[in-house]
Amino acid sequence: METDEAQVTKHVTGLGGRLDIYEKILSKQKYIAGNEFSLADIFHLPYGVKLYQAGYGDLIESRPNVKRYAQCFFLK
C-alpha cells in the first residue's frame, strides 16, 4: 500500500497539538495524572516508543517536559 501523506500530515499535526497539552501538564507534575505513576502512564508508554520507531521522535524531543517524561521510561 502507498502512504497517504496528507493523512500522515493531518495526524502528525493533531498529535503535535495533543503533545503541546501534555507539555503544559508535565510542566506542573511528574506524570500524566499527577506526581504518582498510574495506569494513565502505562497506557501512554507504548505509543511513545512507537513514535521513535516510526521516525517521529522529534515530536517528543522538541518538548522538554514530554522528553523528560519519556526519559523516565524509554529514552536513556
Image (cartoon, rainbow, N blue to C red):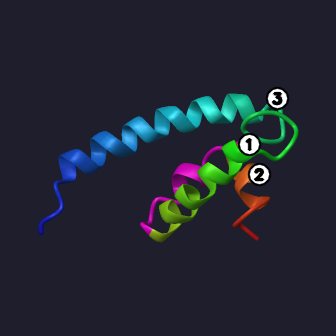
The kind of residue tagged 3 is Lys
Badge number at residue 28: 3
According to the picture, the residue beneath numbered tag 1 turns out to be 65
User: Cβ–Cβ below 8 Å for labels 2 and 1?
Assistant: yes
**Relative height, residue 54 to residue 32 (above, below):** below
What residue is drawn where x is 84% and y is 41%?
30
Rounded to the nearest whole Å, what is the CA distance between mark 3 and mark 1?
9 Å
What residue is drawn where x is 12% and y is 69%?
1
Crowd tier of the residue under label 1, counting other residues whose Cα lies within 10 Å: few below 14, some 14–19, many 20 or above = many
User: Cβ–Cβ below 8 Å for labels 3 and 1?
Assistant: no
Circle 3 SS class: loop
Which residues, given as a range, are shown in magenta? 54-65
Query: Does label 3 or label 1 sit earlier along the sequence?
Result: 3
Crowd tier of the residue under label 2, counting other residues whose Cα lies within 10 Å: few below 14, some 14–19, many 20 or above = some
User: Cβ–Cβ below 8 Å for labels 3 and 2?
Assistant: no
Rounded to the nearest whole Å, what is the CA distance between mark 2 and mark 1?
5 Å
According to the picture, the residue beneath numbered tag 2 turns out to be 68
48 sits to left or right of 1: right
